[in-house]
Image (cartoon, rainbow, N blue to C red):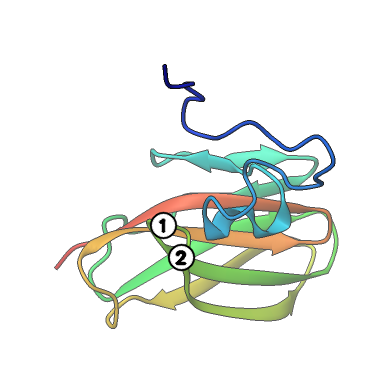
Amino acid sequence: SVDYYGAFPPAVADSNESWINGWTALSESMQVADVTTSNVELEAQGFKFLAPRPNPAANLTTISFELPRALDVNITIMDISGRPIAGRTRRFSAGANQEALNTSHLANSAYFVALTFEGGRMVQRLIVQR
């Protein structure tokens, strides 16, 4: 007889390892982030992240987001497996912000755009199609 464990083997009692650790690069923060698969906005605790426009994008897309206060924000484009492709961090002011993202170097595919900031992370889906 073979024991069936489902997708993941049972945890070792003395281990601090989480089942999600190593599953994708999205899990590096050990948090399951909010992800949307449609062109809607995400909102939590005064943070708002609108879907990229246009989406699908050919060579350029713009992300729009709102912050409750000035913060350092890391913007990361990840492939479908969660592997970071490109990223940058800079300080954004409180209120509405926009950032243009060059997608001309990306192959036609689905990607994730993640905003990581003090205390949180929000993720939106981006399609590149030429």
Q: Name the residue nearer the viewer: 126 or 19.
A: 19
Residue 103 is left or right of residue 115, and the answer is: left
Residue at point 33%, 75% (across, down): 103
Which kind of residue does numbered mark 2 sit on? Met
Nearer the observer: mark 1 or 2; the answer is: 1
**Location of residue 91 by image quarter:** bottom right
Q: Residue furthest front?
A: 1
Q: Residues within 10 Å of mark 2 (few under 14, many from 20)?
A: many
Q: Position of residue 88 (x, y in %)?
A: 60, 81
> What is the quadrant of the C terminus in the image?
bottom left
User: Whole-Å distance between the Cαs marked 1 and 2?
Assistant: 8 Å
Residue at point 53%, 35% (across, down): 8
Which kind of residue does numbered mark 1 sit on? Ser
Q: Which mark is residue 46?
A: none
**Location of residue 80 by image quarter:** bottom left
Q: Is residue 48 above or below residue 28?
A: above
Q: Is residue 123 above or below residue 89?
A: above
Residue highlighted by disc 1: 81
Q: Is residue 12 above or below residue 87?
A: above
Q: Which mark is residue 78?
A: 2
Residue 12 is left or right of residue 35, and the answer is: right
Q: Are marks 1 and 2 in contact (CB under 8 Å)?
A: yes
